[in-house]
Image (cartoon, rainbow, N blue to C red):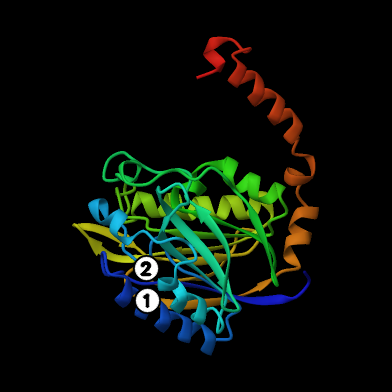
Amino acid sequence: MDRPARIGVAQWRPVLGLLEPNLGRLAVRVEEAAADECELLVTPELGLTGYLLRDLTPDLALPAGDPTLDPVAELSRKVPLVAGFVERGEDGQCYNSAGYWADGKLVHVHRKIYLPTYGLFDEGRFFARGDTVRTFLTPLGRLAILVCEDLWHPSTALLATQQGAVGLLVASAAPGRGISAGTSTLTSRTTWNDLVRLFGSLLGCWVAWANRTGFEDGIYFTGGSAVLSPQGDSLIEGDHFDDGTWVAEVDLSEVGRARAGSAMLREEDIELTHRQLGRILEGRLPGEFRR
């Protein structure tokens, strides 16, 4: 697609465990985005519920088409949007999910695949894992949603772009951790900045990353949402402390130019990867290479 598009990211500090006030926060961000002629708005992981839900998780779980989420659908008539919620799957399990709504309809749902369960993270105790990366068609081209730690695994972004994704919509609740040596920069912020730039430039796709703000249970979430070009250039970056909406103009034609100048996708041998992974899973490689 060879035209500029106005793509936005929004961030806020959710009220833990309460859907209604978070729908209100989403509505404010959508109004801001609409006023700025935004064509797609990405919002944070579990932005409708808060992140550290623990035993509240099943109480907040909703089927993807539940009428309780109708206000999100209505807001998408103003601006197509990505919003994070706790999904009750057909199997009765709870999923950390993000949906894409447009024109009053739920178009696509991604269930978070990689659930951090270490240190301050406890997701594996309360959520089931998703098992699929899929793309979906929009007026801005074919896109894919990833949720937070999904992006820390190179396979997910590669799977998305191998299915034709020209943009990655990343919803996160990334806390601030560690201090980079000799600086005042949080180590976790540096890593996130590196990740979103790397995958955008390596795979020739634009990235819209929305990260929440505020404190929960003493944990600080860093904000700093960003939209990046297919060259990995930051087009706009949100505040690291305050709630808000930021909209950038993305030249969609840059995807083709970026990919023409890079051999990454053109020469990626997914058949080789498939064969090698099959051998690893079948135990046909030496043990030291199967770990």
In the structure shown, which secondary structural element does the residue marked by tag 2 occupy? loop
Which residue was labeled with disc 2? Answer: 48
User: What residue sits 47% from the left and 50% below the top?
Assistant: 112
Q: Please determine whether, in this image, residue 73 is positioned above or below residue 191.
A: below
**Which residue ends up furthest to the bottom in the rendered image?**
35
Q: Would you say the residues marked 2 and 1 are in contact, meaning their CB atoms lie under 8 Å apart?
A: yes
Snapshot quadrant of residue 84 = bottom left
Could you say where residue 37 lies in the image, as x and y percent from the top left?
Answer: 58, 86
**Which residue ends up furthest to the left in the rendered image?**
218
Q: Give the camera-side residue of 89 and 130.
A: 89
Query: Which numbered disc covers residue 79?
Result: none
> Circle 1: is it few (<14), some (14-19), or many (20+) Cα within 10 Å?
many
Which residue was labeled with disc 1? Answer: 23
Q: Is residue 19 left or right of residue 27?
A: left
Q: Is residue 60 left or right of residue 102?
A: left
Q: Is residue 58 left or right of residue 100?
A: left
Q: Is residue 52 visible?
A: no
User: What residue sits 42% from the left and 64% below the top?
Assistant: 44
Q: How many marks?
A: 2
Q: Amino acid at mark 2?
A: Leu
Snapshot quadrant of residue 100 = bottom right
